[in-house]
Image (cartoon, rainbow, N blue to C red):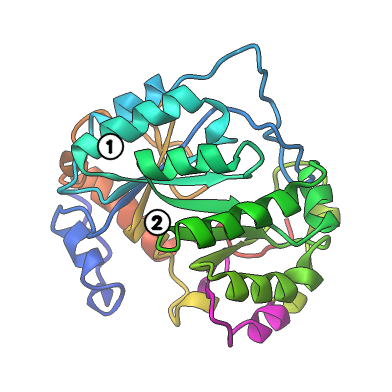
Amino acid sequence: MQNRLPVDNWHNLFAPDLKRILLGLPPLGLIVRTVLNIGCNAHCVMCNGARYDPSNEFNYTSVMKILETLDSHTVSAISLFGGEPLLDKNGLFDIFKRCKKKGIKVLITTNGSLLDALFLDKIIHDGADEITFSLDALGKTHDSIRGMPGLSKHIEDMVCYIRNKHPSFRVKINTVIMKNNYKEIPRLIKWMDKMGVYSVTIHNLRNCNNNYKKLKVDYLKQILLFRKLTNTATKIEFIGYPSMNNKEEKCNYLLHHLNVLDNRKIIPCHYRDDNPFFLDRPIKYLYKMDEFKRYIFKKIMTCRKCLITDD
C-alpha cells in the first residue's frame, strides 16, 4: 500500500499552489534557483565561499544542461547564485541567449564588485531581468563584512546608475543579519526607500564557518529590529523567519522555488540533505512523480531548519 500524503488542512495553506503540487503540476511562477560551484572573489566573514582561482576558468556547461529541462510553460525564471555568477562573463551571456530563446527570465545575485556602467548596460540589454545586490550595510561596515574596500560605495553607484539610466529595471538587495550590521539595517532600508529598490530579503545567518557563534545576533534583538522595519516603502522578505512573513509557521519557499546544484541535484532551500532527486528530465515530469510530491510536500509542511536556533 502506498504512503498517503499528509493532507490534513492542506487546503487552508498556500492554495492554490500546494493544490497544484498535489495534483502533479508545478506551482505557478516557479523559479529554478541554480547554485553554482563557481567560487567567489569576496572574502566574507560569515562565508566559506572564497575559493575562486582566476587561473581555472569556470564555464556554464552545467547550467546549459539544466536549461535543457526547463521551458517557459512551467518555469518563469532561472535565478543564478554563485559564489559570484559574474566571474564567467562569456558563459553568462550564453545563458542569456539560451533563456531568451526559451522565454525564461534570468535573475542574478551578485556582490557587484565586477560591474561597471558598460557591463551593466550590456547585462540589462542582453537578457538579465533582475539584479540582486548583496549589501549588508552602507559604507565601511559592508566593506569589512565582505572583505572588499570600497565595495559599498561601488554598489551604491551602480544602483544610482540603474535608477537614472534604466528606471524600470528591477533591483533587489540581499542582507545577512549579524552582529556587525544589525544596528545599521534601518539606515540601509531608508537608503533603499530613497533609491527605489524594489525589495530587500533579510537572511538569517547560516552556520558556514567558525565565525558563526560570534556573529550571531540574539533572537529577541532580531525580532525587535524587524518590528521597527514594518513601515517602509521597500518590500521586506525574511528568510529564516517564517512567522515574520506568514501566520502559519510553515515553509512556503518551495512553493515557488526549486533549488538545483550545478550537478543538477535538487536541494531543499539552502540545506543539502541526502535525497535521490535530480533534474534530469523535463521539469513537469518531476512534479508528476509520487515520490517527489511526497518529498516536496513534507518539506513545505514540516521543515523548520532555517529557523533561528542555538546550534
Q: Which residue is nearer to you in this view: 31 or 260?
A: 31
In the displayed structure image, the side of residue 11 where residue 211 appears, left or right: right
Magenta span contains residue 226: yes
First-in-chain label (1 vs 2) = 1
Q: Residues within 10 Å of mark 1 (few under 14, many from 20)?
A: many
Which structural element holds mark 1? Answer: helix
Q: Residue at x 37, y 56 (%)?
A: 254
Identified by mark 1, the residue type is Cys
Q: Which residue is nearer to you in this view: 268 or 61?
A: 61
Image coordinates of residue 294 in percent, x first then y, are: 27, 52
Magenta span contains residue 80: no
In the displayed structure image, the side of residue 240 where residue 225 appears, left or right: right
* Residue placed under numbered mark 2 in the picture: 299
Image coordinates of residue 215 in percent, x first then y, are: 82, 56
- The image's mark for residue 99 is 1
What's the CA distance linking mark 1 and mark 2?
29 Å
Q: Residue at x 46, y 19 (%)?
A: 59
Q: Residue at x 44, y 48 (%)?
A: 268
Identified by mark 2, the residue type is Lys
* Magenta span: 223-242
